[in-house]
Amino acid sequence: MKTLGEFLIANQQKFQDSTGEFSKVIHALRLAAKVVSHEVNKAGLVDILGEVGTTNIQGESQQKLDVFAHDLFIKALTNRKIVCGIASEEADDFIQVKHSESEKESKYIVLIDPLDGSSNIDVNVSLGTIFSIYKKKSKGSEVVLDDFLQAGTEQVAAGYILYGTSTLFVYTTGQGVNGFTLNPAIGTFYLSHPNITLPREGHIYSINEANYASFPQAVKDFLKKSKAEDLNYTTRYIGSMVSDIHRNMLKGGLFLYPPNAKSPNGKLRLLYECNPIAYIVEQAGGMAVSMDKRIMEIEPTELHQREPFFCGNSEMIDDLQGYLQKTE
Ligand code: P6P
């Protein structure tokens, strides 16, 4: 079975002018994913080992896992100087990756949610990392905010890492979606889910219905219809987006995070949650929209802006859009 490394080499050879720079970005994300996977899988032991609130043998205080994951991905990407800028959910502003005179300028930027769903750590629910890769578009030697405020259609690649019953690295570069499962015994990702494609039909919808009272009427009407007996829909909601999305990718379904009273623009972040997931879902044959438009066509205005987010099987999205376009 092909490893992620072999897959990258095979794909790199398809682009005669490739310099291997992009592969190095994926290699760095892959390395960080292995370390985060190890830490996530021993999180439950932290209390038992008595590390919480004290210092470990290196004298470092026990970090919260999401800060740990942020630091790790940032280090993996900056130490190798393979990107020129990074934006993270855990950092208010973007991070400039400076190159010395002798170092070759990198052309890639990465936007990342280092550990999405981290509030689930204490209850042993799966977590995820979500990333998006673009090319720097500004002319100067330093990245500027506009380099990060690109529409999702400009993505060079996008992916997620699911720290679940196994650790899965799923990504696309625009030629379909492939998933790699980590063999923790030897630290190698193997191609376990080649060319992931959404099943033609979906009968699952994922939504937090506790917010029903303040959903837009169009969403309420869609949900009412979805409960009709003859549709044999079922609802599944883990509350950790990568888990909900990955299940729907394999089994078919619709993920919805509408606007609500607590989150008037929805809760999910456009740049490092909605756009990368949208790229993956579209590459798997599905669709991803905000209230009235394709999510990847939204022109971002802020680094951490939130958007309503609906993605999954095309026929389920078409059905939902029939309601959304009748908005009140
Ligand atoms: P709610 C996790 O906190 C997260 O960012 C996503 O992973 C998940 O889909 C969503 O929030 C869950 O939000 O409001 O349903 O708890």
Image: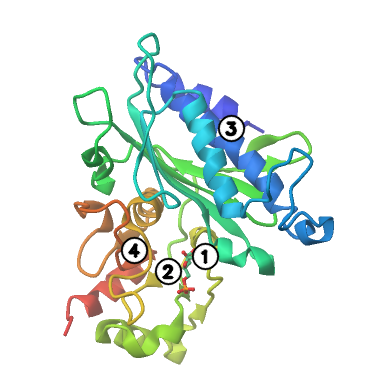
Mark 3 within 8 Å of ligand 1, using the beta carbon: no
| Secondary structure found at label 3 | helix
Mark 2 belongs to which amino acid? Answer: Phe
Q: Are marks 1 and 3 in contact (CB under 8 Å)?
A: no
What residue does disc 4 label?
Answer: 314
Q: CA distance from mark 2 to mark 3?
A: 28 Å
Q: CA distance from mark 2 to mark 1?
A: 7 Å
Q: Which residue position is annotated with label 2?
A: 255
| Mark 2 in CB contact with mark 1 (< 8 angstroms) | yes
Mark 4 residue element: helix
Q: Nearer the viewer, mark 3 or mark 4?
A: 3
The disc, 3 or 4, on the residue closer to the chain's N-terminal end is 3
Residue 14: name its quadrant.
Answer: top left
Image location of residue 52, percent across then percent down: 73, 58
In terms of secondary structure, where does tag 1 sit?
helix
Looking at the image, which residue is at 52% across and 22% down? 9
Rendered view: 96 above or below 120 = above
The residue that mark 1 highlights is 244
The crowd level at tag 3 (other Cα within 10 Å; few <14, some 14-19, many 20+) is many
Left or right? Give the position of 246 relative to 288: right
Quadrant including the N terminus: top right
Rendered residue at 59%/47% (across/down): 68
Q: Residues within 10 Å of mark 2 (few under 14, many from 20)?
A: many
Distance from disc 1 to disc 4, alpha carbons, whole Å, reads 17 Å
